[in-house]
Image (cartoon, rainbow, N blue to C red):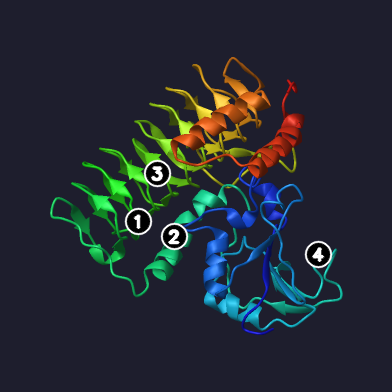
């Protein structure tokens, strides 16, 4: 292919393993490390990629096919060597990693049923692959380190005043407009990235690798441990360890989150705590949408996995490896079950269906607080998710 390619990022079989976070976005729109997967691929390819995703997502995330297209599975983290191999692909060639398609070149605008008539090219390196929902936090530190080197290359970090304590400042990057006061930033175990217009208030303790994206607010006395990414326009407080916020979400008060993933437009009530380790130190089981059951994992640590637009009230408590769907409202005392379907409303005493109209009213109100609007396309996507997820809810009223 030519150096400039028409890249289309397709949802591979990983999508179902990445639910609920791929309910309202293509795989390419997931954040891990510092930026999103599509932002990584755009940067490496020096182009604007489009999407091949689910039919109900396509109006918001369209494909832009051309005469010759390079379809790429964005769940593989790009490297320069990988991108060089992709750029060398010719029509009817497929690039495989462990017999799985990473990229292929075709004049068709749709995904092939199989690759039996494609010439096989094999990936020449070990790739980071985001295959399941727990990879979003467990592989975050490694991706963050890669992103840090790329995004800070040939850039100058902004100076901080003497009220702060910096350990290994050469691995700390402060973007323009960021404000940091009376904080400790320790990059001994990994880099620390502070985005534009982020604010770290007094008494906060940060131990890398950490990424605080643009316009993140870290409240006073917050403790943040490594492997943590806080997506744009989010607010955090309390204690966090190896947590990934996709963006636009709030955990503004005391309470613990560890080995967790929080979608967009979530709110976590004051003093909420989520266990990330079983009392018997055993490996956790995580709900699997594909098998419709809890699946054993090789993980000892796994905390809260909360889908987009979900919220929990003050003093909420969650057992190890609790997975919460989209637009769920949780409140009350006690531990709710460890799989809570999308559009559920209730708590440990039981759940009912969160009426779609009321759920949208809450979404509009939260987005308005951050100066955003819920679009008609967003509403249509959420309506589809409401219908798709009804199979998991005992009460299926609308």
Mark 1 residue element: loop
Q: Which of 119 and 89 is in front in this view?
A: 89
Residue at 73%, 20% in the rendered image = 395
* Cα separation between marks 2 and 3: 14 Å
Q: Between marks 1 and 3, how big is the CA–CA gap? A: 22 Å
Please identify the quadrant where the N terminus is shown: bottom right
Distance between the alpha carbons at the discs numbered 2 and 1: 17 Å
User: Would residue 176 be found to the left or right of residue 72 on screen?
Assistant: left
**Distance of mark 4 from mark 2, alpha carbons?**
32 Å
| 214 displayed left or right of 350 | left
Q: Which residue lies furthest to the top in this view?
A: 349
Q: Mark 2 points at which residue?
A: 144
Of the two numbered discs 4 and 2 in the rendering, the one whose residue sits closer to the viewer: 4
In this view of the protein, which residue sits in the foreground, 159 or 203?
159
Query: Which of labels 3 and 4 is toward the front?
Result: 4
Q: Nearer the viewer, mark 2 or mark 1?
A: 1
* Residue 89 place in picture, x, y as percent: 70, 81
Mark 3 to mark 4 CA distance (whole Å): 41 Å
Res 310 quadrant in image: top right
Residue carrying label 3:
241
Label 4 crowd bin: few (<14), some (14–19), many (20+), radius 10 Å: few
Earlier sequence position, callout 4 versus callout 2:
4
């Amino acid at each position: 292919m030519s150096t400039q390619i028409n890249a289309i990022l397709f949802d591979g079989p990983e999508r179902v393993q990445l639910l609920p976070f791929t309910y309202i976005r293509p795989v390419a729109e997931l954040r891990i490390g510092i930026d999103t997967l599509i932002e990584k691929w755009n940067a490496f390819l020096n182009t604007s990629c489009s999407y091949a995703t689910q039919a109900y997502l396509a109006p918001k995330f369209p494909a832009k096919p051309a005469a010759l297209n390079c379809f790429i599975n964005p769940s593989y983290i790009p490297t320069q060597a990988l991108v060089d191999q992709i750029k060398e692909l010719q029509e009817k060639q497929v690039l495989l990693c462990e017999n799985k398609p990473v990229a292929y070149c075709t004049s068709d605008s749709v995904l092939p049923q199989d690759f039996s008539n494609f010439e096989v090219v094999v990936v020449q390196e070990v790739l980071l692959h985001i295959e399941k929902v727990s990879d979003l936090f467990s592989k975050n530190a490694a991706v963050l380190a890669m992103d840090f080197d790329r995004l800070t290359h040939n850039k100058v970090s902004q100076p901080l005043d003497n009220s702060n304590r910096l350990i290994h400042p050469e691995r700390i990057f402060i973007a323009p407009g960021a404000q940091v006061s009376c904080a400790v930033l320790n990059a001994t175990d990994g880099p620390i990235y502070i985005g534009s217009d982020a604010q770290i208030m007094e008494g906060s303790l940060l131990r890398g690798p950490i990424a605080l994206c643009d316009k993140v607010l870290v409240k006073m006395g917050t403790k943040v441990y490594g492997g943590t990414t806080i997506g744009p326009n989010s607010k955090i407080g309390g204690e966090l360890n190896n947590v990934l916020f996709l963006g636009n979400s709030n955990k503004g008060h005391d309470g613990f989150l560890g080995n967790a993933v929080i979608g967009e437009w979530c709110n976590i009530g004051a003093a909420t705590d989520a266990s990330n380790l079983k009392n018997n130190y055993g490996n956790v089981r995580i709900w699997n949408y594909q098998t419709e059951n809890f699946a054993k994992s090789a993980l000892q640590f796994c905390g809260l996995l909360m889908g987009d637009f979900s919220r929990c009230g003050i003093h909420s408590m969650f057992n190890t490896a609790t997975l919460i769907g989209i637009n769920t409202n949780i409140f009350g005392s006690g531990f709710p079950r460890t799989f809570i379907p999308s559009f559920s409303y209730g708590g440990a005493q039981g759940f009912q269906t969160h009426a779609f109209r009321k759920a949208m009213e809450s979404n509009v109100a939260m987005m308005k607080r951050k100066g955003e609007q819920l679009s008609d396309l967003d509403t249509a996507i959420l309506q589809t998710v409401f219908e798709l997820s009804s199979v998991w809810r005992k009460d299926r009223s609308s």
